[in-house]
Amino acid sequence: MSWAGKILRVNLTAGTVKSEPLNMEWAQAYIGSRGLGTKYLVEEVDATVDPLSAENKIIWATGPLTGTMASTGGRYTVITKGPLTGAIACSNSGGYWGAEFKMAGWDMVIFEGKSVKPVYLYVNDDVAELRDAGHLWGKSVWETEEMIKKGLQDPLARVSSIGKAGENGVLFAAVVNDLHRAAGRSGVGAVMGSKNLKAIAVRGTKGVGNIKDPKAFMAATKAAKKVLADNGVTGTGLPAMGTQVLMSVINEVGGLPTRNHQDNQFEGAKDIGAEAMATPRKTDGKKHLVTNQACFGCTIACGRISKMDEGHFTIENKPQYRGANGGLEYEAAWALGAANGVNDLECLQYANLLCNEEGIDPISFGATVGAVMELYGMGVLTKEQIGIEAPFGSARALAFLAEETVNGRGFGKEIGQGSKRLTAKYGHPELSMSSKGQEFPAYDGRAIQGIGLAYATSNRGGCHLRGYTIASEILGIPVKTDPLESQGKPELVKAFQDATAAFDSSGLCIFTTFAWGLQDLSPQMQGACGEQYTIEELAKIGERIWNMEREFNNRAGFTKADDSLPARLTTAAEACKTGPAKGKFNELATMLPLYYEARGWDSEGRPTAETRERLSL
Amino acid sequence: MQKVLHITADKCTGCLQCEMACSFENYGTFATAKSRIKVFNFHHTGKKVPYTCTQCDEAWCLHACPVEAITLDKATGAKVVNEATCVGCKVCTIACPFGTINYVQETGKVQKCDLCGGDPACADACPTGAITFIDANWTGLGKMEQWADKLGNQPSAA
């Protein structure tokens, strides 16, 4: 069965912590993690609530395969109504926290209400209690982890927490665990902060048992690990170069958004990608990259561990950034680098470390800085307003704005509202490169048609992780499709979105899908949870989850008009300027009706009665 | 041929597959807290290091035990705790210089690596070869081969 079978319900207003049985009917139908946590949220929270009010709830959820020997089985998801978008927010993290929580004997924890003073939740196997966090308020993620472990006298405890950004209501604040792993997107950290909840510390010694068919499960996980090891991407490319392997690939196809999407190729890409990280620096002769690192249970190990140049201007007299630290990963390197025209690798890593240390999403932060730099170039924003000269390419401006944003100072407070609100305030909403208020990640929707549609239709706003069609359109996984061609993409996007929802809900990492399909997930789910999890059933559950999320957003007030891309991505006037995609723009208007049709939605983007019935919604 | 667990720390990624395999072998659950092999993650250097019992020939734990609960498995060379005999006095945990024999609150006994009777689950589960189970007399064979390769397979200078 593989579920722990019980959940924690914490009422922060009343200060109570209660155990309740997991709703097994929902668990069967929505699996776990993303799907199951979202089911609880949509059943318990009115879609129209203010995300930062006491009426919103926030859930940490693991999946049935979290904490097992299935490769990458260490994931957890934070689910809430997001403050950046007003849509469903659902952010997934690796590291070790998720498995530790599951091993303590819990599938998920639901927080409701709002505490009058800062608290943290301490879970030690069956015992869970709220503790005072007055001494932790105002501390960074890194300080919080260390102080909690010292206070508990337990170096083996795992901590999921917010830094100052979450406390200060940065709308893209992240929840961070194990120092450098984050449930990064959509501002889940701001919801945590709004409830005066600083951290969840966990020690789990009971373990995950209750496997439906242990022998079949072990055989299935072993076979699936071999598929990962034998695959060029998951077996060789990601362990050696990390996600940064993509920087040169995406730049070459003309799909690397540059300077707030003014360009689609970055002349500095070679300075900030995998090759640059592995080449000795001119300044001190040392390589940036130290080693790779796995999250819990992961046999891919794509994580990057790096050391900065100790002489770099950003870290003079700042010893905490001198040891080995997490990063850079591709999305952060792009958002902090190409999106702002900055090619100083050391500066990007410094900004990335600030994101981890105080808990913000580097994608939304970097993309918002890109919009600020464009406004500065236009003369709309001045040096006096921003606090520094901020032309595209300025590493000093990037470092300064990162410091201001994570510490809630000066113009950083405005950046902390995200690009949609900031550009609207200064009269140029067209410069926010976002959908549903969430900034796009590192792939150009003009040069890569499917990913543009995936951005426009993502239930959590602009995002690559809800339907990573890059796999097909660029890498040829599982089959190569032409990135410049919009035909066939509505069906492709739907298939990726549905399968991703199933993977996310199992407790495994979506990076396995470079090598795995549902045919590899199914035997592992069957061994752990039961025979019913066939390929067809997993695809159907994924589709059910997608529609459930969509209906929450519809109830929250989203319409067809929100399934949109900025004009910069959809008009000939701002088409790709260079490379193989020169002259291309996203053909969303053509694809969207076909996507709705493929989904079984009406022309306004609402699931039809037949679709709802087919998916048992 | 006697075999030993051999650690090549540079290859460890910190995935903890070994810890899960160990606990599953001995307890039937995935519980890293119950594992007899532990991976240490030194985040200030980025190093991950698995560590477990090396099965000393003159084992401090075996000699310290007042009730002779720890015995030699002659087939594998493992020093094995007999749970029925162990009284949970913990003297072995003090005697062991390496910390690799530990008390278990839930059972009131100590536990240590027993090489899974000659087919260690941790080595089988390790995805990178950081933990291998190899000929006790030739733990240096891999390194010797690397250097021999460097010595003998250089492009000719001439």
Image (spheres, coloured by chain):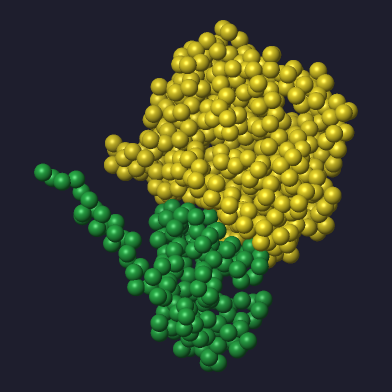
Outermost residue on the left side: it is B158
Outermost residue on the front side: it is B1
Outermost residue on the top side: it is A573
User: Does residue B90 appear in this view?
Assistant: yes
Residue at 55% x, 88% y is B69
Residue at 46% x, 36% y is A244
* A582 sits to left or right of A433: left
Q: Position of residue A553 (x, y in %)?
A: 78, 30
In terms of image quadrants, where is residue A284? top left
Number of marks in picture: 0
In the image, residue A234 above or below residue A463:
below
Q: Position of residue A282 (x, y in %)?
A: 29, 36
Residue at 54% x, 43% y is A356
**Chain drawn in green:** B
User: Does residue A259 appear in this view?
Assistant: no
Q: Give the position of the N terminus of chain A as an image quadrant.
A: bottom right
In the image, residue B139 above or below residue B102:
above
In terms of image quadrants, where is residue A535? top right
Q: Position of residue A126 (x, y in %)?
A: 74, 64
Residue at 29% x, 56% y is B146
Q: Give the position of the C terminus of chain A as an image quadrant.
A: top right
In the image, residue B18 above or below residue A358:
below
Q: Position of residue A378 (x, y in %)?
A: 52, 12
A213 or A377, nearer to the observer:
A213
A460 or A167, nearer to the observer:
A460
Chain A painted colour: yellow
* B47 sits to left or right of A426: left
In the image, residue B82 above or below residue A431:
below
B119 or A296, nearer to the observer:
B119
